[in-house]
Amino acid sequence: MKKKKIEIFVVLMIICAVLIPQFIFASGENDNAEQGVQPVKLLVWAEPYKNLLGESDFTWDECIAKYKEETGATTDILVVEYPFSGLEASVLIALQSDTFPDLYFGSGNRIIPLIGLGVFDTIPEGLVSVKQWPEIAFTLGDFGGEQFFVAQSTSFFPLIINKALFKKAGVADLIPDEATRSWTKNDYSTAIKAISKLDDTWGVSFDLVWNDTDKGNDAYVWADGDPWTDGTYANATFNTPKNIENFEWIVDIMQSDSVYPNALSIDVFPQVEDFINGKIGVMCEYFNTANEIYNQYEAGTASKGVVDPMYVFFPTDDGSPSKSLILVNAWAIKKQNDQAKVAAAQDFYKWLYDTDNYWTKKIKEIPLPTALANGAIDPTAFTEKEELLALGTMPTMPGVIPLPFAAAIPGFQQLRTIWHENIQLAYLGKSTPKEARNKMQEEAQQIIDNAIAEQAEMTSGIGQ
Amino acid sequence: MEKASNVITKIIKNKIYYLFLLPFYIFFIYFLVIPSVKVFYYSFFKINNIGFHLRFSGFDNYRNIFNDFRFWTAFINTTLMVVISIPMVVIISLFIANSIYREKSGLKTFVRAAIYIPAITAEIVLIMTWKYIFNPRVGMLNYLISLVGIPPMDWLGSPSLAPFSVVLVVLTFSLGTPLIIYLASLGSIPDSYYEAALIDGANKRKIFFKITLPLLRPTTVFIIISMTIAFFQIFSTPYLMTDGGPVNSTTTLVFLLYKTAFIYQNLGGASVIGVVLFIICTTIAFFQYKYMSRDTEY
C-alpha cells in the first residue's frame, strides 16, 4: 500500500513538473496586474546588429540602460535579435499568434508588405527630426502620403568588377569610367568574353536562384528596361518589348561558356573566394559582401596584383547610369489598440532616431557608408576609402533612377517564386526568353489581381 | 457498450500505469492530435494572415491546389523519390545486415556505427558537407569522375540530376535505422533453421531467399511502411540543398506545404496539402500492411 502511494506521489510530481511552468507562464500577466501599476512592456525585434558592428562592444542591454538613463523612461524593453533565415515563417507565426513585436527593425522588403496589410502604424509628424535626417530617409518611408517609417540606412546591389583581370585580358579600355561607373552592354559582353579566354577564369558569375528571384539578376533586365510593375503597383510589366530584349541578351550570356559554374544552384560557392583570387571578372553581390571584398583587398588579405575591385552599375544600351533598386532598413511601430504601448514605442522610436544619442553614435560605427544618420549625409564621415565611398554614393549619383520598392507590389512573395521558375526555364533553354517573360506576365498579373482582391476583402479586422 | 465499460474498468484498475503515461498523452493530444484535426478544418477556409480571420470557402482551396501545376510537380517528385528510395533502402540495408551479421564483432560494430552515425548526425552538417562534395567547381565528386574521363556535372544545378543528388543524400542518413532493425531481426531467427538447411545441402543463395527473407517479412513490412511515410515527408534536404529548384525539380510535397504556408502565405492551401499527405500516407500504410504483412512465427 505504501509502495503504491509513493508511486502515485511520483506520478503527480511528474505531472506538476510538466504543467506548473505553463500555468506560471500563462498567469504572469495577472500577477503583475495584481501588484499595481507596472511599467509598459515593449517587445522589440531587431536585426542582429552585433554582426554588423563587428568587434564593437555594443549590446542591447547597454543601449536600453542608456535610453532609460537619458530619458528617464520606465518602459520594460525586451529586444529579440531574430535570425535572418526563416524570418518569413517567424513573422507569419507572430502575426497569427498575436505576438508580433511592438517595434520592428528590418529591411523594407519585409516592412512594406506588412504596411499593405495594416500591421504598422504611421509615424506622427515631428517624431523624427527633419533637421537630423536627409529628405530621402522620409521619402522612402512615405506610402500614399503617410509616413510609415523613416529609413535609417540604404543599400543597393552593385556589380563588382576585377580591374586587374580586365587589364590581364587586354580589355582595360572597357573598364567603366571612374566618375560615372556606367558602361554599355557591348563593353560588358566583350569584356567577359575576353576574360573567360584566360586560363581557369570566368567572365561573369551569376547567383541565379537567389538573385533572379530577388534583386540581382533581374537588375540586368530593368537596368534600362521597365521595373516589375507600373507606378500603381497594380499592372505587371514583365513582357514589355524592352524587357524581353534585355532578357534575351542576358540569357545568351548565361548559356555561353563565360559563366561561372553552378549558376542554377542556391549557393554559388566559392564565388567570392574565386573573385578574390582573381578568377572572376564580373560578379553581382549583396552590398555587405561587396563591402567585405573591398575590406579584404584593403587589408591585404586579397592579393593586390590579382584583384583590384571596382563597383559599377549594371550595363545599359547607351552606357548611361542604370536604374537602381535602393533597399532600406528602418524601424516600424505596430498598429494596436493598447495606446500605452503605442506611446512607449513612439518614445523609444524618437530616441532611436535622435542622432545625438548613444544609439545613433553606435550605429555610425557600422561600416555602411549609406547609413542615413546625420553623419551619413557626408559619407566621408565614415570612410576615406575610395571604393567604399563610391559604393555609398552610387545610388544617389546623377542620372541614377531609384526603382520603386518591389515589396510594395501586392503578392510580392508569390511573384518571387514565378521569377525563379520562368527565368530558370529560359536559362536552361527549355523555353525562349520571350515565352518565359510572357508566361511571367500572365502569372504575375493573376497573382497581383488576386492579392489586391484578397487584401481588400480580408484587411477588415486588422489591428483589432 | 460492454466493451467500453471493460476498457474503463481496466483503466481504473491500472490507473497508476495510465497516470505515468498521462504527461505523454497530454502533449501528444495537444501538439499532434488537435493540430491534425484542425488542419482538416482549416482546409475549408480562406485564412487572413493577420489576426487569423477565417472565411468559409468550401472546396476552393482544394480546387486551387489541384489546379496548380506546382502541386502535381511536387507530387510527382515526391512519389519518384519514394519509388526510387524505398527499394534501395530495403535492399542496401538488408544486404549489409546479412553480410555482416555473422562476421566478427569488431567488423560488425564498425559497419553498424559507420552506417548509423549519419542517422544521428545533424542533417544540416551532412547536407552542407554534401553540398561541397557536389560543388561543380571544387567538389570531390566531379574530381572523382574526372579520373575516369567523365566531364564535370552540375549535380545540383541541373533539373535532371538534382533530384537524384537529393535522393542520394537522403539515402545516406536513411540506411542506419533499417540496418539496426534488420540486424536485430536476424538475431531472432533460430540458428537451427540454418543448420537444417545446410544439412539438406542448401547453398547461401537458397538459404537467404527461402529462410532469411521470408522470416524477415514483418521487419521488411515495418521498414517499408515507416520509410515510405518518412520519405513522403522529405523537407530539410531539398530546402537546404536546392531550395526546391532548379525549376521545381526537387520540390517535395512537404516543401511545397512550407512554401504555400510561409512564402505564398496561403494557410488554407497549405492545409489542403497537409490533408493530401495524410491521406496518401494513411492509404499507403493501410495497403502495405494489409497485403504485405503476415504473421511469422520462428
Image (cartoon, rainbow, N blue to C red):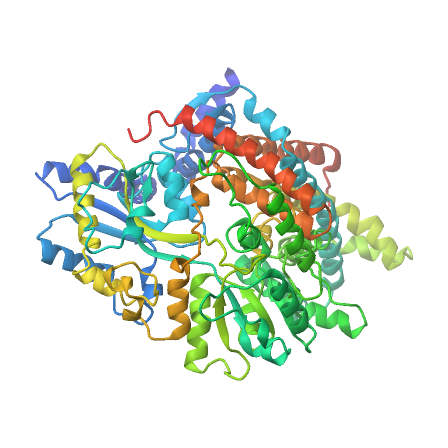
Q: Quadrant of residue B192?
A: bottom right
* Quadrant for the N terminus of chain A in the image: top left
Which residue is nearer to you in this view: A211 or B120? A211
Up the image or down, A371 lies above or below A295; here it is above
Q: Is residue A53 left or right of residue A66?
A: right
Q: Quadrant of residue B13?
A: top left
* Quadrant for the C terminus of chain A in the image: top left
The residue lying furthest to the front in this view is A318
Which residue is nearer to you in this view: B210 or B144? B144
- Residue drawn at (22%, 37%), measured in percent from left and top? A27
Q: Is residue A359 left or right of residue A403?
A: left
- Residue drawn at (56%, 43%), measured in percent from left and top? A417
Up the image or down, B297 lies above or below B188; here it is above
- Residue drawn at (11%, 42%), measured in percent from left and top? A38
Up the image or down, A304 lies above or below A356; here it is below
In the rendered image, is residue B251 in sight?
Answer: no
Which residue is nearer to you in this view: A380 or B258? A380
Q: Is residue A68 left or right of residue A201?
A: left
Which residue is nearer to you in this view: A99 or B249? B249
In the rendered image, is residue A11 in sight?
Answer: yes
Residue A235: image x %, image y %?
51, 34
Residue A425: image x %, image y %?
68, 47
Residue A418: image x %, image y %?
58, 42
Q: Quadrant of residue B99?
A: bottom right
Q: Is residue A218 left or right of residue A155?
A: right
Residue A241: image x %, image y %?
62, 43
